[in-house]
Amino acid sequence: MPFDIVLPSLISFVIIVIVFLHERFETKLKSLFEEKEFRIRDAVFLVIAMGVMVTIIALVAQQAQQIIQVLFLAAYSFVLFLFTYTAVEKWYLALVPPVLFVALYLYAWNLIFLNAFALLFAIFISVYLGSLFSWTTMLVFAGLITVMDVIQVFGTKFMGTSADELVRLQLPILIEVPTFPLKSAIRLGLGDIFLAGLLAIQTAQKYDRKAGIVAAMSTGFAFLVFEFLVINLKYNDYFPATLVVIAGWLLGLGIYNLFKRIRSS
């Protein structure tokens, strides 16, 4: 039976990188945000804003292509500058990544660059915003964004429409990687990677780094199982991958706590 190991392996690797980078920059980021954290209403507002953005893009993307491109390029460039500046603390060095990104997008864009910058954005956003969540607000956010994802994919179908429009504009809002040993390709949105990274960060903070790594590995395993089912059931439509992320994370929590009890008994 056909299956894929590329996306599951990549997801686990990226989440582990997020956990280690957040640990590396946690003190600096908390100082930057002056120890502030999202409240529950902030998490609710963030989910609402994401849902509204998906809806607007689905409805007006064809009529406002250039505006959407400019807004996304500006937002991505700002994220690149902000994170690079946090790391190197020299503004002239922090200008290099966003300038390179815009130049490549305008003059030499291809699938390799799209995937590379999409992953960078997912990693940077996860690391940057990870410090603003607490365990409680993370749980609220994860629950609400999963509900929103299910509604926008199966109900309104705006998630698929907006993704198609942004892919047509070649904006790095998802990754598209080949599958192996099955010879095909599969896509995954940045929001799903961000959620997986956020869950792993908070798990590592609540328990320890090993717990975050276990969550990363179990999320990759969940995608392995999910892809196996999708491929063999020949499901070709959009699916809310947040459900897969949540399932993998819960599996990781269960495995970690089980082994923790076994060691302590």
Image: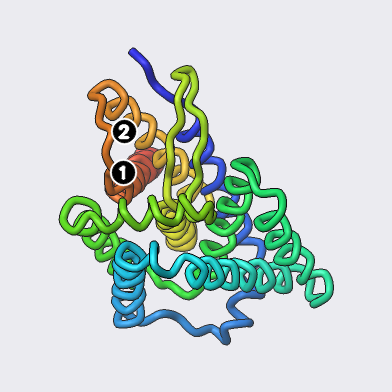
Percent position of residue 178, x then y: 51, 29
Of helix, strand and loop, which one carries label 1?
helix
Residue 244 tag number: 1
Across and down, in percent, residue 103 comes to 73, 60
What x and y, as percent, mark residue 243? 27, 48
Q: Please, what is the three-letter code of the amino acid marked with disc 2? A: Phe
> Which disc number belongs to residue 33?
none
- What residue lies at 45% left-to-right and 25% top-to-bottom? 184
Q: Is residue 90 above or below residue 233?
A: below
Q: Amino acid at mark 1?
A: Val
Name the side, left or right, on which 163 lies relative to 144: right
Considering only vertical position in the picture, is 165 above or below 225?
A: below
Neighbour class for label 2 at 10 Å: few (<14), some, many (≥20)? some
Q: Are marks 1 and 2 in contact (CB under 8 Å)?
A: yes
Q: Earlier in the sequence, mark 1 or mark 2?
A: 2
Q: Which mark is residue 226?
A: 2
Residue 196's x, y, as percent?
Answer: 42, 52
